[in-house]
């Protein structure tokens, strides 16, 4: 209905322009003013192509062009210190939550932050989040959903240790595994370690 009102207002003023040439400048001014007000109020139709274009222009002018040293170095290679697992949920973006800069972290995002094989980094962070649809679909106890989210993160951390090279790296202190929970409802972030009580394998 809001879009209909928007179109009606523009159509009415456009008609006025065509019928009263002497009021051209006044009507044109009103069209611009009303259009601006309606757009500011959120009535502008969403244009996905324009959104992508303006998003990249903002990145190019505010990030890329202002830090040629960083992006010049990234063009030659990368050496990220983190491998971060997070959910595909659009409300959970590790780069925004933790202010990671380009080249600082590998990002692996999928539904319910499932863990794939390990890569050569020194820190692996598995991030769960509030209101996770993946977790919601797996359980039927709404009051305990936060506990299930955290437990799912811990299970993924434990699954990482099933890879011999991950276990060996953790035992030798070359790799750190951490769990995290981002609560975007309250703007809170928790980070924790698990006590795996791992000891080197005994070879007989």
Image (cartoon, rainbow, N blue to C red):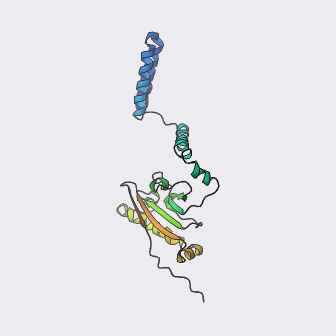
Of 158 and 30, nearer the camera is: 30
- 25 above or below 161? above
The percent coordinates of residue 187 (x first, y second) are 37, 55
The percent coordinates of residue 12 (x first, y second) are 43, 19
Q: Residue at x 53, y 57 (%)?
A: 109
Q: Residue at x 55, y 54 (%)?
A: 102
The percent coordinates of residue 27 (x first, y second) are 43, 17
Q: Quadrant of the N terminus?
A: top left
Q: Quadrant of the C terminus?
A: bottom right
The percent coordinates of residue 33 (x first, y second) are 41, 25
Q: Residue at x 57, y 76 (%)?
A: 168
Of 9 and 75, nearer the camera is: 75
Of 20 and 4, nearer the camera is: 20
Name the image quarter holding residue 160: bottom right
- Residue 197 in view here: yes
- Residue 8 in view here: no
> Horizontally, is 55 left or right of 23 in the view?
right
């Amino acid at each position: 209905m809001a879009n209909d009102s928007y179109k009606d207002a523009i159509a009415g003023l456009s008609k006025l322009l065509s019928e009263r040439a002497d009021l051209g400048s006044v009507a044109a001014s009103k069209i611009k003013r009303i259009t601006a007000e309606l757009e500011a109020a959120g009535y502008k139709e969403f244009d996905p192509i324009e959104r992508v274009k303006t998003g990249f222009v903002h990145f190019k002018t505010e990030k890329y062009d202002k830090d040629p040293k960083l992006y010049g170095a990234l063009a030659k290679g990368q050496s990220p210190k983190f491998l971060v697992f997070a959910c595909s949920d659009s409300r959970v973006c590790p780069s925004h939550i933790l202010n990671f800069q380009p080249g600082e972290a590998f990002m692996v995002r999928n539904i319910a932050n499932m863990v794939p094989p390990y890569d050569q980094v020194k820190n692996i962070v598995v991030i769960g989040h509030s209101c996770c649809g993946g977790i919601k679909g797996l359980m039927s106890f709404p009051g305990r959903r936060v506990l299930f989210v955290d437990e799912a993160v811990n299970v993924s951390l434990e699954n990482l240790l099933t890879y011999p090279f991950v276990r060996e790296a953790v035992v030798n202190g070359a790799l750190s595994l951490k769990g995290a929970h981002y609560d975007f409802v309250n703007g809170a972030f928790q980070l924790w370690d698990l006590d795996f009580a791992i000891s080197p394998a005994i070879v007989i």
